[in-house]
Amino acid sequence: MQTQTLEAYGHGLYAAQYEELEVSLSTLPGASPVRSQGRTFMVLGNHMIYPFRYAKKDVPVTAARLRRATGLRAELIRRHGPEPMQQSFDLGLDEPDEPDPHPDLALLSEDVKVVLVAYACSMAQGVTRIEWGSAELRREDRYLIWHHHEPLSLPSR
């Protein structure tokens, strides 16, 4: 894997995506690293660039969903993603208290927005699709609702 960690493929790929972004983006003006959970995230101006492997096969990014609806990634997208397209329906009932945010989210300014770099890849085919954009995470499940996404060109093989 040639990463800074001693992780195997699945976890090594997870580590490498952050390391590659750090190496590639650290020379840009205004780029700043933020360490969280043993990973380095890159912030450019008011935008955090967040890599996200959404599939092992070539499927549209609109099919992307998170493995879990909780945790740092889900909170990051909910708190720093775009405003929901459809506001929640207010029945006048008491809402359950939201859990305290992950402590690492305090490292980010409230005005930082997350930019997802979503990609599909497998060991056999490599990266088959890559797009970037902004998406909200639905409250009731793990599905992303894309507000904007654009494909990035892949190098020819």
Image (spheres, helix red, strand yellow):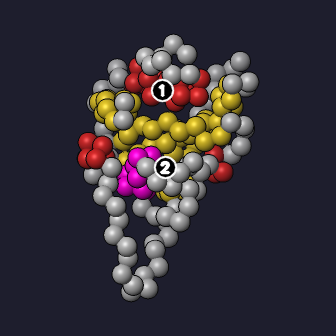
Nearer to me, 116 or 121: 121
Quadrant into which the N terminus falls = top right
Residue toward you, 148 or 52: 52
Q: Earlier in the sequence, mark 2 or mark 1?
A: 1
Q: Secondary structure beneath disc 2?
A: strand
Indicate the position of residue 112 as horizontal and vertical percent values. Answer: 32, 46
Disc 2: CA contacts within 10 A as few (<14), some (14-19) or many (>=20): many
Dot 1 lies on which element? Answer: helix
Image-quadrant location for residue 91: bottom left
Q: What residue is at 47 percent from the left and 79 percent from the top?
A: 89
The residue range painted magenta reads: 72-82
Taking the spot 37% from the left edge, 48% from the top edge, the residue there is: 113
Q: Residue 103, labelled with which disc?
A: none
Residue found at the far bottom of this picture: 92
What's the amino acid at mark 1? Answer: Ala
* Residue under pointer 2: 134
Give how far across and how far down residue 69 sits, in percent.
Answer: 51, 55
